Image: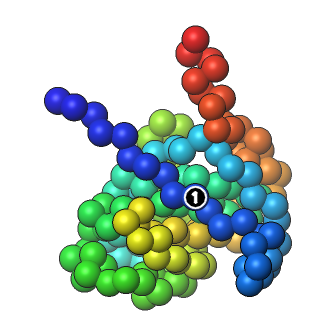
Amino acid sequence: MENKAKKTAKTPKASKKGYKNTRSAPRKEVEPIKVTYMASLDDLAKIAKNCQIVEASSTGLLLTVLRDDLIPQSLRGNLNLDSLIGNRVYLKLEPMNMEISGEIRRTKFLGKQGFHIAVDYSDDAPEYWRECLMDLLPKPGELEKDTH
């Protein structure tokens, strides 16, 4: 069976004209990390599968989700996912054998690349843990260097 590589979307740069920089912490671009699924903490319903973390900061994560990986049929037909904003979710990161909880703060339609979903960590996640996680996430190309 052929393994098709999914394209990751480029994130807008804060320096672009008309792009307001409202970040409370700087983001770090990371090697795409697979999130097995994203589920609601309120009713445990799965929202998306096979997402990818593309950027991280000490306040949250930026994920890319393809339209086909959205589980509720009602979300697949929309051009925006604003109905998810404010949902408390947890993310299952299989490669790191961990779950992270947080709240969806922003979403953005990226066209054929799918959507960006920004998840801020839960308030009960200690700041030192957030910073340590950010340091542990691999930079782009870092995993390729380790395998050669």
Drawn side of residue 49 relative to residue 122, left or right: left
In this orientation, does residue 122 appear? Answer: no
Q: Residue at x 41, y 71 (%)?
A: 111
Kindly give the residue lying farthest to the bottom in the view shown.
Answer: 83
Residue 54 versus residue 23 in the image, above or below: above
Residue 23 versus residue 78 in the image, above or below: above
**Which residue is labeled 1 in the image?**
10
Q: Residue at x 37, y 52 (%)?
A: 50
- Horizontal and vertical percent for residue 11? 62, 62
Q: Regarding mark 1 in the picture, which secondary structure is present there?
A: loop
Which quadrant, please, contains the C terminus? top right
Q: Amino acid at mark 1?
A: Lys
In this orientation, does residue 45 appear? Answer: yes
Answer few, some or many: residues within 10 Å of disc 1's Cα (few below 14, many 20 plus, some between 14 and 19).
few
Kindly give the residue lying farthest to the front in the view shown.
Answer: 17
- Horizontal and vertical percent for residue 103? 57, 74
Q: Residue at x 75, y 58 (%)?
A: 27
Q: Residue at x 55, y 53 (%)?
A: 53
**Image quarter for residue 57?**
bottom right
Kindly give the residue lying farthest to the top in the view shown.
Answer: 148
Q: Please state which of residues 76 and 100 is positioned toward the viewer in this rendering.
A: 76
- Horizontal and vertical percent for residue 56? 68, 55
Which quadrant, please, contains the N terminus? top left
- Give the colouring mode of the picture: rainbow
- Horizontal and vertical percent for residue 126? 77, 58
Numbered-mark total: 1
**Image quarter for residue 49?**
bottom left
Residue 59 versus residue 51 in the image, above or below: below
